[in-house]
Image (cartoon, rainbow, N blue to C red):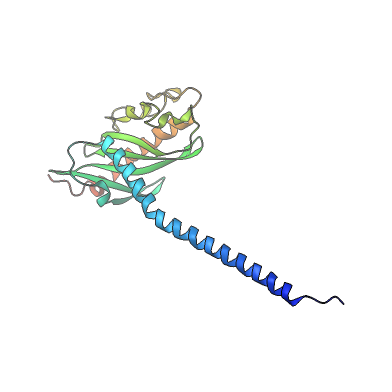
Amino acid sequence: MAQIDSSQFRLGNSHALTLTVIALLISLLLAATKWVTHEQIIANEQLRQQQLLLQLFPDGTDNNPFSHSIEFTDPARGPLKAYPLTGPDGIQAVIVDTYANDGYNGRIEMLIAIKKDLSIAGVRVTRHLETPGLGDDIDHRKSDWITTFTGKSLERPSLPMWSVRKDGGEFDQFTGATVTPRAVVKTVHDTLVTATEHFDILFKDTKP
């Protein structure tokens, strides 16, 4: 029977132990890096959203909208958060953080600014996976289409017109891409309906 060289055995074990330690150190380094950068990622995301919020409602407010949030429930989307923008007379508008699940490539996240008269101050898409050159025109950096919601309310336009032109409504669709704008229009309208139903919650601090 062949004899095992004990020195080779020890050397093999030593190499295995070294590799295990290296793998453990790499794992710890990756975990530490993720932990360190996590807060920065959150801060960067909040800064980006704050910049979008200022685009939606730049005047007449005096607070950091992320300093306070209001929780409410949308029937189709479940729990949502709204960020109040305050002025001398209390809450001037709320920014609803919501989403559409029926985009062409899935979820479309957006911020919808609603004034206390329940008209829209503005809408911005914050994250999406829509096809470049087609559905990505919902992004304000790509086109002005998203600004067509500004000033709209549940009465302006009337319910039948709250859809894309292909469906008989007043909102433009994109050439070769109807699913994406249809999803956004529906979500904006649904959010207005929910905001109306939850007015006392969203604007409870508004002064008379």
* Residue 162 horizontal side relative to residue 30, left or right: left
* Residue 196 horizontal side relative to residue 61, left or right: right
Image x and y of residue 200, in percent: 23, 47
Towards the viewer: 167 or 188: 188
Residue drawn at point x = 36 percent, y = 30 percent = 146
Q: Of all residues shown, which one is farthest toward the right? A: 1
Image x and y of residue 112, in percent: 32, 38
Image x and y of residue 19, in percent: 61, 65
Towards the viewer: 170 or 108: 108
Residue drawn at point x = 38 percent, y = 30 percent = 141
In the rendered image, the quadrant that contains the C terminus is: top left
Mark count: 0
Q: Of all residues shown, which one is farthest toward the front? A: 7
Towards the viewer: 65 or 89: 65
In the rendered image, the quadrant that contains the N terminus is: bottom right
Image x and y of residue 133, in percent: 48, 27
* 73 lies above or below 119: below
In which quadrant of the rendered view does residue 87 lie? top left
Residue drawn at point x = 20 percent, y = 49 percent = 204
Towards the viewer: 200 or 43: 43
* Residue 159 horizontal side relative to residue 101, left or right: left
